Amino acid sequence: MGYLVPEDSSEKTFREKDKVSLIKVFDFSERFGETEVMISGNLGTVRYFTWDLLWKPVGDIIRFVFVIDGDDRYILMCSDLTLPAGQIVTIYCYRPKVESMFRTLKHLIGGFCYHFRTKAFPDVGRGEDVRYCRPDENERKNLISLSKPSNVLSIFPESPSDFFSIFP
C-alpha cells in the first residue's frame, strides 16, 4: 500500500482516504509508456508507469516504477526521486549480478574476513540512526587517507605467506 502525496500540505500524512493499492495500478495499462532498456545485455522494450507515493515503512516519498515486460509484472522502488524509470529498470537488471558477486566474494573467496576499512569509520551503536553519526575532523582525515589506493595496498602483507598468517 502506498499513499498519495498531499498537494496542499508539506506534511507527510498517511490518511486512509489516500491509500493506493499498488497491484491495482496494473489494471490501468493505458497510462503506461514504453521505453527501451538494457536487460541482460540485450536491448528490450518494456512498458512502465512511474508514481511517487508516500510509503509508510520508511515514512517518506518513494518512486514506484510499475513495469510490464511481456507477461511479467514488476513493482520497483527507488528512493532517488530524480532517476527516470528507464534507469531504475536498468539498475534493477544488474541486481542479480551484483548479489551473486557479493555471495561469491563472501563464501568462496572469503573477501570479508578482514575488515580493514570499517575500523576507520565512527562507531554506531545499536539502534542509532546512521545519518546522525558524522565523523569529526580527525576521523574524516583518517577516512580520506585510507581511501587512497596506495594506503589501502599498504595494509596488506607483502608476501603471500604473510597474507595467510592474518587469518586464524
Image (cartoon, rainbow, N blue to C red):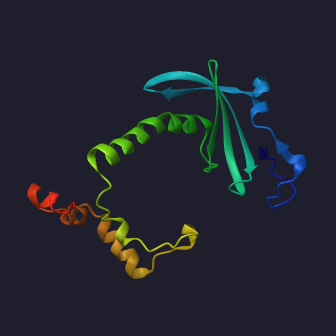
- Is residue 111 left or right of 75 when viewed as pictured? left
Tell me: 4 left or right of 156. Answer: right
149, above or below 100, in the image: below
Q: Who's the residue at 88% across and 56% down the image?
A: 8
Horizontal and vertical percent for residue 31? 77, 27
Q: Quadrant of the C terminus?
A: bottom left
Looking at this rendering, what residue extends furthest in the top direction? 70
Q: Residue at x 63, y 43 (%)?
A: 77
Q: Give how far across and how far down residue 132 sits, in percent.
A: 57, 73
Image check: 31 left or right of 103? Answer: right
Front residue (pair 33, 158)? 158
**Residue for point 79% across, 59% down:** 12
- Percent of width and height locating residue 36: 56, 25
Q: Looking at the picture, how far across and down is residue 157, in whole percent? A: 14, 62
Write down the quadrant of residue 58 in the picture.
bottom right
**Vertical position of residue 130 compared to residue 76: above or below:** below
Q: How many marks?
A: 0
Q: Residue furthest front?
A: 168
- Quadrant holding the N terminus: top right
Q: Is residue 21 above or below residue 149?
A: above
